Amino acid sequence: MADRTETEKRDLTKDLAAAVRGEVSSAAADRALMTMDASNYRRVPRAVVAPRDAEDVAAALRVCREHGVPVVPRGAGTSIAGQATGVGVVLDFTRHMRRIVSLDPAARTAVVEPGVILDDLRAAAGAHGLTFGPDPSTHSRCTLGGMIGNNSCGSHSVAWGTTADSVRELELLTYGGERVRAGRGTGPTGAPTGLPPRLRDGVKSLVDAELALLRTGYPDLPRRISGYALDALLPERGTDLARALTGSEGTLGVLTEATVRLVETPAARVLAVLGYPDESAAAEAAHTLLPHKPMTVEGMAADLVGSAAGLPEGGAWLFVEMGGASPAEAAARAEALCRAAAADGTTGHAVVTDPAGQRALWRIREDASGTATRMPDGSEAWPGWEDCAVPPARLGPYLRDFRALLAQHGLRGTPYGHFGDGCIHIRIDFDLLTPPGIRRFRDFSHDLADLVVAHGGSLSGEHGDGQARAELLPKMYGPELVGLFGRFKDLWDPAAGLNPGMLVRPDRLDDNLRFAPLPGRPVPVEFGYPHDNGDFSAAVRRCVGVAKCRNEKTAAGSADVMCPSFRATGEEQHSTRGRARLLHEMLAGEVITDGWRSPEVHDALDLCLSCKGCRSDCPVGVDMATYKAEFLHHHYEGRLRPAAHYSMGRLPQWLHAAAPAAPAVNALARTPLAAVAKRLAGVAPERPLPALATETFTRWWWRRRRAAPPADGRTVLLWPDTFTNHLSPQVGRAAVRVLEAAGLRPLLPPTAPLPGGALPQPALPRLRRPPLCCGLTYVSTGQLDRARAVMRRTLDVLTPLLAAGRPLVVLEPSCAAALRTDLPELLADDPRAPRLAASVRTFAQTLEDFAPDWRPPRLDRPVAGQTHCHQHAVLGDAADRRLRERAGLTGQLSGGCCGLAGNFGFERGHYDISVACAEDQLLPAVRQSAPGTEILADGFSCRTQLDHLGDRPGRHLAEVLAEALGEADA
């Protein structure tokens, strides 16, 4: 039977490849990437097709009909009800069908292909003062086709409605190959226009026979997304076929083009944040704000917001955006709204006019679909009842009943969402791993559906029914109307070839759960995964698919890093989500069957820069750099590794050995022998080899100490990392100069434990043991046994020296991040590790924490460059920004990753991607900077990338300050 299935799959792929000009694949990796969306569900497709145009779609449908294989249209895969998963052929519209065909500012319309990303349309429309009204939190990566399929809404629906309100005309292909141009209105016979005769007559007959049911069977509320909107076909509603098809979740036709309405965007926007005692009070108040014509009324409670700055006093908040023709008008409207709200019992309010401040607060809301997947105690929470909606005036009572129902079932969740439209988002701590937990999920779902209907609501208020809610539609609509949905589906898709199992005749809501094939017990791993109870499967499960890592551009003013390799390639497998999906399938063992030896997972992780950006930028804290190190450890266990792992992975050893012969090594690096050496070492031929310091930082340090003992001051331990010691000792020397000027006494640790934790003395002879190491290069190449060994040695030496509360000052951000996170997570069994990690400080943090009264020299010049990706992700740069400000260094550093990323950019085969990552943010920021701008790059990789690819070198902040101190002394 398995052989027959494989033969059928090969025949299908062969026929599709012959018929379609776009990409066709039935490879395990490509299928694995499409098994899940952002829901709880998983279905394995047979093949994936990326059509180039409508003719490709038609050809793919024809082949699928001939083979009797179903089809699932898919955009960015951010659907939360399971409708973007399928068992047949997935049509991936994100590769090619992404054109904005036309944009008419006068008519305020645009014609788009289904793969157009919402933010791309908004940017094009924004040039004319227009926008597309619906704006879900995934606006930076969701597609128009997916929005139309789900009838998406977003924060501004109180002003501009749902996607259905913005659709004017749709071009579709049915599974049977019929072409449909669906709009509004009827022809001479009273039937909808734009349909082939079979559909035209069938739709008219169905509507004419069920006028009473269509007029009485639907609740009246702004966020009614569930089911087919067949009431849009009523003659008094203009027989709007385009509206009726919007929200049909790819079950009736495959969208190939859409004409959509654009709206005028206000010239100015101001955010009013209203505080309330609790979420019930906020919910009760939300609908009372609607007469003020707000653009948004979004609700969040303290258990989601946490310690966010800029919020007024309260236990819950409403984010209310007001527009105006000018900033003054928008601010005046916001102030008037705040005064009116205060009369109804707010605990406080804030009016945020600064665009950066507004973005920071909106980011909390936009990331909520990810951050809500972890409860305050770290336990998992899941979608499933993500977006039910009730009439806005009923939201307060509904929310109280909803909380009571959660308690009745012993469940927890964090409600938030579109309070002004009566729509609640929530992730609930369902146990979807065990039979009792799944039964509770099912029982709760039935009870909650009854509660929603009792309050006059809709099971879906934004994300559609898919598999998550479709089984329960009879509770909302009754069997007669649901039967009509089935007849409508059969009319359009008699072969049941489009997205079967969704919306009509759906699979059960507890079938196809994506967790079912995962191992029942934790797999043996090396890292501790402290936030996931040591369970690698739980760590991989963190990815819920919201796909923030698929952002193709970094938002203005953002310092985000994630995900540089996706921005360079545009390929799903090179996004954080794609890699997490492949690891999930590796653990499941159905599609990817080689476990840790999987070439599919290896190939996807090969272009992961280990930048750690996802650790901070992913709303749920997926840490792909750690997962990559874990995978590489197991993948190469007992096997020969790539040459780069031996050369660059063990770089600290080689540099220590080569240090005495640095002049000779540097001379050889300038001869033709360098090309041979690079080839043998797995180094990219395009990369110059960095020059070794002829005097290491540690050697300079001991020479200086013997000549002049350090002045008195608070002792800090200065970490002599490999890069500073052997490749850029000038950074270490500069840091010593600045730390001493600030009244601190920097000392280097010895290379072996000293009796009683004594500090190294000036007369102490230099020890000839290898220097201490953070283990970074071993971790990044997955040599975790060696990493653990060098880390334990570091702990042995440093633990007694740090006992007095001395900080460990680390100049290289990547080494600081390794000591802060990799060391305690890899040595989870060693109680000394957390103490060492807590002692780690960056250069700027040390000055701020231990020399708070020191005033740096004034430089009064602009800066450009890049915050190191590891610092952004693990350590933060707030202290650096404050230090720069005190020194008169103005301007912001860019986000992203330099692309060199330690060994990554030096490895053979990575050069082009490395350059593309540098061209994303770093190099443009440097090129666009004015003459005289100080180029800052605290990381050795960042400085090296600038040396190789730019025309302006970068310097560590310590070098800049030390130079200014020298000028001041002079």
Image (cartoon, rainbow, N blue to C red):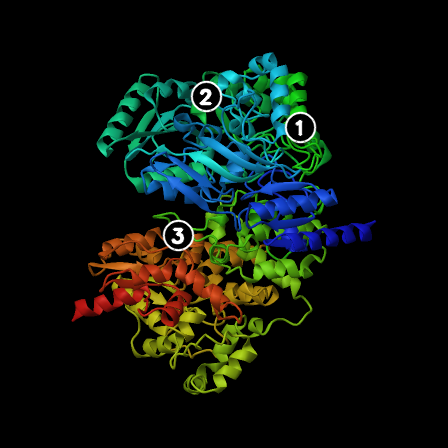
Toward the viewer: 923 or 647?
923
Q: Evaluate if marks 1 and 2 touch, with contact meaning CB atoms under 8 Å apart.
A: no
Residue drawn at the location 38% of the way across and 47% of the way down: 555
Circle 1 is placed at which residue position? Answer: 491
Q: For this rendering, which residue is in front, 744 or 155?
A: 155
Q: Name the residue type under label 2.
A: Ser
- For residue 37, which quarter of the picture? top right
The residue that mark 3 highlights is: 876
* Proximity of marks 3 and 1: CB atoms separated by less than 8 Å: no
- Identify the residue under disc 2: 280
Looking at the picture, tell me which residue is in the foreground, 707 or 789. 789
Q: Quadrant of the C terminus?
A: bottom left
Q: How many marks on residues?
A: 3
Residue 308 in view: no
Amino acid type indicated by mark 3: Gly
Work out whether 440 lies above or below 763: above
Q: Earlier in the sequence, mark 1 or mark 2?
A: 2
> Circle 1: is it few (<14), some (14-19), or many (20+) Cα within 10 Å?
some
Residue 432 in picture, x, y percent from top left: 66, 36
Classed neighbour count for the residue bearing mark 3: other residues with Cα under 10 Å, few (<14), some (14–19), many (≥20): some
In the rendering, at what x and y percent does residue 18 appear?
66, 55
Residue 454, percent from left and from top:
58, 15
Q: Which label's residue is closer to the chain start, 2 or 3? A: 2
Q: Which type of secondary structure does the marked residue at label 1 adopt?
A: helix
Query: Image point 64% across, 49% down: which residue?
Result: 48
Q: Estimate how packed mark 2 is, as few (under 14), some (14 to 19) or many (20 or more) residues with alpha carbons within 10 Å.
A: many
